[in-house]
């Protein structure tokens, strides 16, 4: 039985009909509560309110009921006969801030499920939907990913309104717009599209909304759903949509002319368009002095190269191009591998898998057990496997360095996709040496060059080269030299000339 | 066909091509017998005896990783014979359990009899093979090359590496040319230059720690002197002293030392370090005769004063003596090149060729004769810098009282 026709019916002036209708729609759920009250004894009018237990604040509801029960009796009878009585009730009775009149059953049902309380009064063909939302939610804590040493410690929570407020507190400008959308035919998840009017790339907001409107899914439980449903390169291992738990990062993105997508019930906010290099930029870069910021950014690029290529380079050198290893090192590697019964390729894949296994096990287990897993794992892999002659000590070092390097990449999803790319590179270089490595690497690079993120080339501003955007790619130039926004922004001017501080003349 | 299907096609194609080729050309590093030194001797009249020094990584590098058994010897030296070098190299496979891998070779040792027979085949083989490096050192030995190869020498675990380091450190003695494959081939192919290779010799230089009273019970490889070639055939040896005169002609020399007798004091010597030795050769062409003008500019430092007079007193005389000595050294090497071996290993032909390309055509065919007749003049300019802090003579303070 579909309830759709019932939802579309209008509220009638017969209370009994309305109540029956709503009860048919909502069924016998225990958390669905109906509360009757006498509205006006003089005219013998009954009232009913519906709400969902747990989603509303009981105190607030008590306040409303008190106001109605005490003061509704005082209303003159003739008021109840007027056409716009509900408007009148709003003005005279209701003490709380947010409420609206509705005419459709469906709207009322949505309101009840969203934490509002629906008041129906006999004789009126309108219902009153009072916002009484209040539910348990996590307080603002430091985000689990994207940690910084210097910078704000607050992170997004599961509450979309808290999240938008965190950004609003950072940008107190009327041009910060938040457009509301609802996705998910069953979950009816709130989704806010945030942007800076006048700075955002022209046409971007419309494109984002158009893509979100195309989503026809029953449920959206996390922003990952949205990410996969609107991204440009659905087959790619690269993620073309930025994710963050940090309000300062979102604010910075908005000021650069990007669009942020807040999804209810998740602390992860999406930003588009996203460039590949962005994954190596940490918030610290901008808050620390620019020398330090630039240096650690370079360190992170090195970490990226190591994490992507080190095992495959090692496999390539050891099994194909021994002449490229310095002689002394070659002897050392050979001595370490003397008793290892596997080819380097097998050894590398084995160790990489062992490492991923440990990482995954440590992550899924309860925290105290997780630490035990990593200690036991590292002991076994690092010490016992070498002594047993299963792997060479060099391979342990390579895998360990690679693992550490991959943890140095600030963006978690980027770190994962780089980790995935490692395996085809290892296999290709283990089978064809330098040729295989170069071939596979080129395939990856060409693929990365071919994809876009909301109309922007993924590898920009490196390819295509954008000279004015270089100030924030390899190096993080000082703020006083950073006069313009990235070229995607509509309003390029960020600050006036002559921003460089200097001591006073005398 | 849109972009995506092209991408899929490329991916599929590369995946297939990688999988069906398997592991083409793959060789694990621990399946290689890495050669660190090669020795060439004559076998019979006209055959090659090839000795190779192969590193045993497990023993050369100690206990890295899992314990592995072994004899404890860092090297494994084997020898095989063949009609050609390559055949001998292939014959190594009769008893080497691993594929012989040449890319990490440090040194090629040529036995004297082999060098006198001619090394053209060796130069070709070692430059043609892609696994071999042009930076490999090439030396000639009066001993058996196989013996030099198999001797544990120097402080390094792998003797090949020891010889490699010997070459790098040897420049302060300046008694042997740094002859690597590149230089050998260069002078072999050039007109107007003949190869000259360093000489190594086994000498009882080591002292056993267990029996220190038996001096020289251990043989060590000594790098000193040179072998002179004409074409691909060795002509003879240069003593370490002769080699000192040769070096400025073929490579950059710095921090060579010179020992000068003290003026008017027989038996007392002073040592000078030549910090800078700049030498130029200026060829000339006069009445169908070659003239060669050698100009030397030397900056020397006093490092050990043995005279009883103070440095300030003897300095000018030392300069004169050093100049005389250096000029004699050059004349000596020219005597050897012009009279004794009649071969131009001093690269005079190349210098002449560059300066007089027209005349070179006339003399090229009989260059050795022209070279032997060439008129050589030497002009040396010596400057002794003063060690300001210690001008006094090395006399005891007590005697002064």
Image (cartoon, coloured by chain):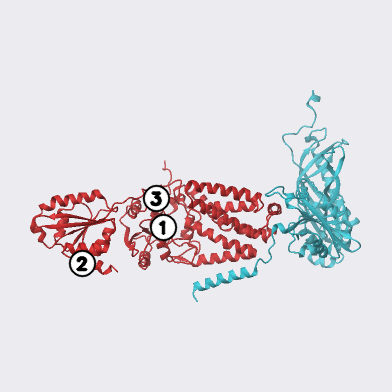
Lateral position of residue B396 relative to residue A120, left or right: right
| Disc 3 + disc 2, Cβ < 8 Å | no
**In terms of secondary structure, where does tag 1 sit?**
loop
Q: Which chain's colour is red?
A: A
The residue beneath circle 2 is A10
Chain designation of label 2: A
- Residue at image mark 3: A155
* Label 3 to label 2: alpha-carbon separation: 43 Å
For marks 3 and 2 on the same chain, the one whose residue lies earlier in the sequence: 2
Dots 3 and 1 on the same chain: yes
Q: Is residue A364 left or right of residue A192?
A: right
Decide which of B174, A431 is in the foreground and name it. A431
Mark 2: few/some/many CA within 10 Å (<14, 14-19, 20+): some
- The subunit letter for the residue under badge 1 reads A
Q: Specify few, some or many for label 3: CA neighbours under 10 Å numbering under 14, 14-19, or 20 or more.
A: many
Chain identifier, cyan in the render: B
Q: Chain of mark 3?
A: A
* One can see residue A332 in this view: yes
Q: Nearer the viewer, mark 1 or mark 2?
A: 2
Q: What secondary structure is marked by label 3?
A: loop
Q: Quadrant of the C terminus of chain A?
A: top left
Q: Position of residue B204 (x, y in %)?
A: 86, 45
Q: Residue furthest bottom?
A: B1
Q: Spatial distance from mark 1 to mark 2, Cα to Cα?
A: 51 Å
Res B29 quadrant in image: bottom right
Q: Secondary structure at mark 2?
A: loop
Q: Which residue is mark 1?
A: A485
Q: CA distance from mark 3 to mark 1?
A: 25 Å
Looking at the rendering, which quadrant does residue B324 occupy? top right
């Amino acid at each position: 039985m579909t309830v759709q026709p019932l939802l579309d019916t209008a509220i009638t002036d017969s209370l009994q009909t309305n109540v029956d209708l709503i009860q048919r729609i909502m069924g016998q759920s225990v958390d669905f509560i109906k509360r009757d009250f006498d509205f006006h004894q003089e005219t013998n009018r009954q009232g009913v309110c519906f709400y969902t237990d747990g989603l509303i604040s009981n105190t607030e509801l008590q306040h409303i009921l008190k106001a109605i029960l005490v003061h509704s009796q005082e209303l003159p009878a003739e008021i109840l006969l007027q056409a716009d009585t509900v408007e009148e009730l709003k003005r005279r009775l209701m003490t709380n801030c947010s409420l609206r009149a509705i005419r459709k059953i469906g709207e009322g049902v949505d309101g009840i499920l969203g934490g509002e309380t629906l008041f129906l009064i006999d004789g009126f063909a309108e219902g009153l939907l009072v916002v009484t939302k209040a539910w348990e939610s996590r307080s603002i804590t430091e985000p689990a990913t994207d940690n910084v040493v210097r910078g704000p410690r607050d992170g997004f929570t599961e509450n979309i309104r808290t999240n938008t407020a965190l950004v609003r507190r950072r940008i107190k400008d009327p041009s910060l717009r938040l457009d509301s959308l609802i996705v998910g035919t069953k979950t009816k998840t709130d989704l806010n599209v945030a942007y800076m009017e006048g700075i955002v790339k022209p046409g971007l907001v419309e494109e984002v909304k158009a893509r979100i409107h195309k989503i026809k899914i029953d449920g959206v439980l996390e922003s990952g759903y949205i990410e996969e449903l609107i991204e440009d390169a659905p087959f790619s291992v690269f993620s073309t949509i930025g994710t963050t738990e940090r309000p300062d990062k979102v604010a910075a993105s908005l000021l650069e002319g990007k669009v942020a997508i807040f999804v209810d019930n998740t602390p992860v906010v999406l930003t588009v368009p996203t460039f590949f290099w962005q994954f190596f930029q940490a918030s610290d870069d901008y808050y620390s002095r620019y020398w330090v910021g630039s240096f650690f950014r370079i360190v992170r690029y090195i970490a990226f190269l190591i994490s992507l290529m080190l095992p495959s380079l090692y496999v390539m050198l050891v099994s194909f191009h021994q002449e490229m290893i310095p002689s002394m090192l070659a002897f050392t590697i050979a001595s370490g591998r003397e008793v290892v019964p596997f080819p380097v390729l097998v050894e590398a894949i084995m160790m990489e898998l062992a490492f991923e296994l440990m990482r995954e096990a440590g992550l899924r287990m309860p925290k105290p057990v997780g630490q035990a897993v990593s200690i036991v794992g590292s002991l076994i892999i690092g010490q016992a496997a070498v002594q047993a002659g299963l792997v060479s000590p060099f391979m342990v070092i390579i895998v360990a360095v690679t693992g550490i390097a991959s943890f140095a990449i600030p963006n978690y999803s980027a770190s994962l996709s780089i980790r995935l790319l490692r395996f085809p590179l290892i296999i290709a270089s283990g089978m064809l040496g330098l040729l295989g490595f170069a071939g596979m690497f080129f395939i990856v690079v060409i693929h990365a060059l071919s994809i876009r993120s909301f109309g922007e080339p993924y590898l920009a501003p490196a390819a295509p080269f954008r000279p004015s955007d270089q100030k924030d790619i390899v190096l993080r130039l000082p703020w006083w030299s950073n006069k313009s926004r990235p070229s995607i922004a509509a309003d390029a001017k960020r600050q006036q000339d002559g921003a460089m501080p200097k001591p006073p003349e005398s | 066909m849109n972009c995506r299907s092209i991408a899929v096609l490329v991916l599929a194609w590369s995946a297939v091509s990688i999988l069906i080729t398997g592991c083409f050309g793959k060789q694990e590093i621990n399946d290689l017998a890495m050669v660190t030194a090669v020795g060439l001797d004559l076998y019979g009249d006209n055959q090659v005896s090839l000795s190779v020094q192969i590193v045993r990584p497990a023993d050369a590098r100690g206990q890295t990783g899992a314990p592995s058994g072994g004899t404890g010897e860092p090297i494994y030296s084997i020898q095989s014979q063949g009609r050609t070098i390559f055949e001998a190299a292939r014959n190594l496979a009769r008893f080497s359990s691993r594929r012989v891998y040449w890319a990490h070779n440090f040194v090629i040792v040529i036995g004297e009899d082999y060098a006198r027979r001619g090394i053209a085949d060796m130069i070709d083989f070692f430059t043609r093979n892609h696994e071999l490096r042009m930076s490999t050192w090439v030396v000639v030995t009066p001993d058996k090359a196989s013996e030099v190869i198999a001797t544990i020498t120097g402080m390094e675990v792998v003797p090949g590496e020891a010889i490699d380091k010997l070459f790098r450190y040897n420049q302060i003695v300046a008694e042997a040319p740094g002859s690597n494959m590149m230089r050998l081939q260069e002078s072999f192919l050039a007109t107007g230059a003949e190869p000259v290779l360093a000489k190594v010799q086994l000498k009882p230089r080591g002292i056993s720690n267990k029996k220190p009273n038996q001096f020289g019970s251990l043989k060590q490889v000594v790098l000193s002197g040179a072998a002179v070639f004409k074409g691909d055939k060795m002509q003879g040896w240069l003593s370490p002293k002769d080699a000192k005169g040769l070096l400025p002609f073929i490579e950059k020399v710095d921090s060579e030392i010179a020992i000068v007798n003290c003026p008017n004091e027989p038996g007392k010597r002073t040592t000078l370090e030549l910090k800078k030795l700049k030498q130029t050769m200026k060829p000339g062409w006069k009445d169908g005769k070659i003239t060669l003008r050698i100009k030397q500019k030397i900056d020397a430092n006093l490092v050990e004063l043995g005279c009883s007079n103070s440095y300030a007193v003897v300095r000018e005389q030392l300069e004169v003596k050093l100049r005389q000595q250096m000029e004699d050294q050059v004349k000596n090497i020219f005597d050897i090149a012009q009279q004794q071996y009649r071969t131009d290993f001093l690269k005079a032909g190349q210098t002449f060729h560059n300066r007089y390309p027209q005349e070179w055509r006339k003399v090229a065919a009989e260059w050795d004769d022209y070279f032997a007749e060439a008129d050589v003049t030497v002009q040396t300019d010596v400057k002794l810098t003063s060690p300001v802090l210690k001008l006094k003579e090395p006399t005891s303070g007590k005697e002064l009282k």
